[in-house]
Image: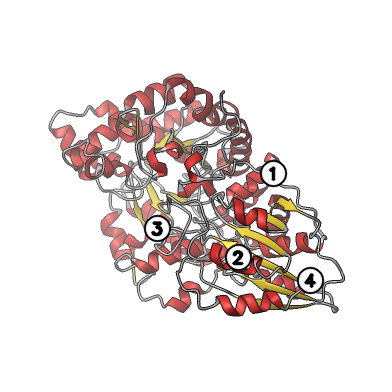
Amino acid sequence: MTVNPTLINKRVSELMARMTLEEKIRQLGGYWFFELQTKGQLDLAKVKIKLKDGVGQLTRVAGAGNLAPLEAAKAYNQVQKFLLEETRLGIPAINHEECCAGLMAKESTVYPQIIGLASTFQPELAREMTGQIRKQMLAMGARHGLAPVLDVCRDPRWGRIEETFGEDPLLVSQFGMEYIRGLQGENPASGILATGKHFVGHAFSQGGLNCGPVHLGERDLWDVYLAPFQAAIRDAGLLSMMNAYPELDGEVVAASKRILTDLLRDTLGFDGVVVSDYEAVVMIHNYHKAAKNRKEAALKALSAGIDVELPSFDCYAPGLQEALEAGELSMETVDLSVRRHLTKKFELGLFENPYVDEGSVMVEFETPENRELAKKIARQSLVLLKNDGSLPLKPSIKKLALIGPNADSGRCMMGDYSYAAVLELMHQDPPKDSGYEGLSQAEVEKLPVEIPTVLEAFKQFLPDSMEVGFAKGCEINSEDKSGFAEAVDLAKSADTAVVVLGHRSGLAYNCTTGEFRDSTDLGLPGVQAELLQEILKTGTPVILVLINGRPLSIPNLIEGSNAVLEAWVPGEEGAGAIVSAIFGELNPGGKLPVSIARSVGQVPVFYNYKP
């Protein structure tokens, strides 16, 4: 279906002329899908109450509903059927999902985290990856993806650096554009709305804290931080934008018309829909203290240019109606945002094709092409930081020691917006009546797709003449050294030790990198550094493998190791890629998209600094 702007504009006008105020406001927000569930199953009684006047968005049917692809497709179709057949105007909803490095849902492909993708220095791989992500999203009814992250990141203390394409505005721009092109496709009717985030400056927050204030001059703002957004709008046709959480130069971005309308729309020419970062509207009130209540927060956000409040109605309903009744808000402002959101629904073809074919959902989830692409990207993302000739492993090696907390972990291969990571967070604090209540620890630890560990990959690659022993040594973020002795003894008895250290990426409290997992320390978490030092003392040659979301300041450990391989967070095929490089079947050719500081005291540190 070809998009006809004139026809769509006419249809939107006709529809809006029939809408009540309540129906309009309901188009400016959404509901967490678990708010429509009871004990993890869609509850039509809740649907009839909450969606009686329609709704703008459904927040993560699969990702928040804890549903497998086919279950998600069926639930999505049921909600769309209600909206089309049992609401007065029959307006379908947009289902949005997270898709940073793969669709954040059960059974979806887990690609390397974005910092690893950037290390390939091949932007075309981003387009190839999101082309496959688009197919999986379309199959189960998602039409809006909350990615890519277009933040230029020059502060590795910020936990979300792993979601970025790095520190260079040109590299970020090129990867961002290709990411968008792959996700949106040739036509909105067969594509996914890509969302540029976080507009603007989010990654350069004070102290590297996720929502800390941003202090940027105009020249840096334009030369560095706005460049990827400008490219995405002008050259890739970006259809959706998300605000940054912090304040920028003293203005809360979510409440700033100067930033979200004058700069974004009037200067940069963005004409899509602006959605709030999750809870950014209420944060104007309860975090930034820039609004005295939720009504004022709603008024400020909508007036600034945030069209849709995500993830759920908190301020816009009933705040916008109260502001209208008090004469503080014009109907024209409400109508402008309603028009923008409805326009996207028509462009996506949701009125003509609101449902998905349940019979063909799994076709896109049971294909080897996705796994092959994850493997291809993982192999090309590896960066060889050091090698004194110890790599590849020599055939003369008879015994190999594999040591470290990330050596036998599939979970460590996945980034902070993988399904496993979010499941972990929801287990710690499950929403009421959701599919996450009552999950056992075993269910949380069970990976949504089969992800080989480095140990398992070694056993697959190992020649008959070589044996491998394994010792964990320590946990990722613990002070317990009781496993040191076993690891050191194993290293002493081996010809070479491969030590796999790093982070656990995620959003939960036990994670060491990812959103809200900011850090003042750029060293290895816990006692991992001490473990490596003890192994180095044995005199056995050491190959250090890093599986991590932020660059690590460990100069003494890198200098002491014979070879160092940076793997970042390499996804479901990462283990095979790592072992392929160690045995020489693969020549690691990735390049660093970020600078590595020798000390946290150097931060911010980046390659193209001014004298």
Vertical order, 57 against 583 (above or below) = above
Q: Foreground residue, 11 or 494?
A: 494
Vertical order, 69 against 292 (above or below) = below
Tell me how far mark 4 sits from mark 2, CA to CA. Answer: 24 Å
Q: Which residue is mark 2?
A: 532
The amino acid marked with disc number 1 is: Lys
SS type, badge 2: helix
SS type, badge 4: helix
Residue at (69% x, 44% y) in the render: 591
Tell me how far mark 1 sits from mark 2, CA to CA. Answer: 25 Å
Tell me how far mark 1 sits from mark 4, CA to CA. Answer: 25 Å
Q: Which residue is mark 3?
A: 79
437 horizontally vs 140: left or right? left
Q: Nearer the viewer, mark 3 or mark 2?
A: 2
Q: Earlier in the sequence, mark 1 or mark 4?
A: 4
Q: Quadrant of residue 78?
A: bottom left
Residue 425 pos. (x, y %): 40, 63
Tell me how far mark 3 sits from mark 2, CA to CA. Answer: 53 Å
The amino acid marked with disc number 2 is: Leu
Q: Earlier in the sequence, mark 1 or mark 2?
A: 2
Tell me how far mark 3 sits from mark 4, CA to CA. Answer: 48 Å
Q: Earlier in the sequence, mark 3 or mark 1?
A: 3
The local crowd at label 2, few if under 14, some if 14 to 19, many if 20 or more residues have their Cα within 10 Å, is many
SS type, badge 1: loop
Residue at (65% x, 62% y) in the render: 363
The disc at residue 461 is: 4
- For the N terminus, which image quadrant? top right
Q: Which residue is mark 1?
A: 591
The amino acid marked with disc number 3 is: Val
Residue 262 pos. (x, y %): 38, 21
Q: Nearer the viewer, mark 1 or mark 2?
A: 2
Q: Is residue 566 visible?
A: no
